[in-house]
Amino acid sequence: MGSEPILRSANGEEFDALVDVMDVAFHGDTTPERRARMRTWMDLDRILVAEDDGRPVATSAAWSWTVSVPGGELPMAAVTAVTVLPTHRRRGLLRAMMDRLATEARDRGEPLAGLWASEGTIYGRFGYGPAASVADLRAPLAGGLALPDPDPDDPVVRLVRADEAHPEIAPIHERARSRRGGLVSRGAAWWTGRVLADPPAERGGARALRVAVAGDDGYALYRVREGAATGPVGNWTTVEVQELVAATAAAERALLRFLSRIDLADELVLHARPVDDALTRIPVDVRALLPQGAGDALWLRVLDVPAAVAGRAWAAPLDLVLDVVHPEDDVVAGRWRVQAGPDGATAQRTDDPADLVLPAAELGALYLGGGSAVALADAGRIAEPSPGSASALDAALRVDRAPWTVGVF
């Protein structure tokens, strides 16, 4: 064992060494081409490294993004690349990085932090809770997917080259963010270097990335994958939709119609869709497009309770005292009187008795409106000293559409 590791900011000259650590932790093998693209989309000023005897042994990073919340958006530290080499586990490195990330995010005025959790048992103790969920949709296309007749005003779908799509689809994504909480902002480098990049080595055996655009209001990113032979001139063919994002319901319907009617295709799979996806209700047969493989997506941590409370819209009046439990974060832990009304919402420290007692992770899980305080109380995750308080919180947090996060970061 070497000396005590030192946690510090990374520098650009050691970027490849840091990617090597990530590859070990995530069982990866990042190509030189992808490493070059990673340099364009990573925020080099927000990478942390733990160094032991002059060598990196742990990493973490963040972006200064925004996330859509009910009624608007808020700054968020988008946490990524959290790794610890197996030689340095259980030495407090993860905790030190999480503390440093939270401190720096607060200093930058970011009331929220978010991540995709590689392991569900790790991040709850740091105050992160699963705030958005996704599910895949799958439909056989033999005989076509029976859909209602299109509306004459539905947008026309056209194909756009992936390397030319960014200027057209980035504004659509930005407008679509207002429909649901949980959607994060994207810079140009993320679009061109990550979302729309299409090197053959990263296609996973599928064909080239295709981009379908519905008018000015929706887009779909998809690939075609061919499997076992189904005859002398054919193979089982799956249309795999990586993203379908729309600012209007009409654009969603038009894209589903297009994707389900691609010639020589046997199956349609739409990855990582919202759990309340309206697409499932469009086919004539309500069983034609069913969710499967549901799982958590964005995990959220509240770093600044007053800013988070004031920064989202509330669906009903509220006056509750929340006792937030977080042994490692005294900035968030403690009792807060949360009041919401026609003129906005506030959270203030109080000594009044608690109406609800909840871990910080459950506060993060509930914040976007996708969870249920009543269900968490039934599960024993939340204590309810004042009966009816969980139901009142649910009513105030209610949203029209479930939160959704598209694209792992």
Image (cartoon, rainbow, N blue to C red):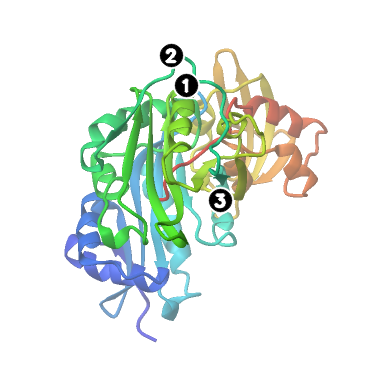
| Quarter assignment of residue 14 | bottom left
| Quarter assignment of residue 77 | top left
Left or right of residue 42, residue 266 in this image? right
The residue lying furthest to the left in this view is 13
Mark closer to the chain start, 2 or 1: 2
Q: Are marks 2 and 1 in contact (CB under 8 Å)?
A: yes
Residue placed under numbered mark 3 in the picture: 127
Question: Residue shown at 43%/68% (left/top)?
Answer: 93
Residue placed under numbered mark 2 in the picture: 153
Q: Is residue 80 above or below residue 49?
A: above
Judged by depth in the image, the label closer to the viewer, 3 or 1, is 1
Question: Residue shown at 20%/61% (left/top)?
Answer: 33
Q: Is residue 264 above or below residue 390?
A: below
Where residue 354 appears, as percent x and y from the top left, is 73, 37
| Quarter assignment of residue 263 | top left
Crowding at mark 1 (Cα within 10 Å: few <14, some 14-19, many 20+): some
Query: Is residue 28 among the parts visible in the rendering?
Result: yes
Kind of residue sitting beneath label 2: Asp
Name the disc covering residue 250, or none: 1
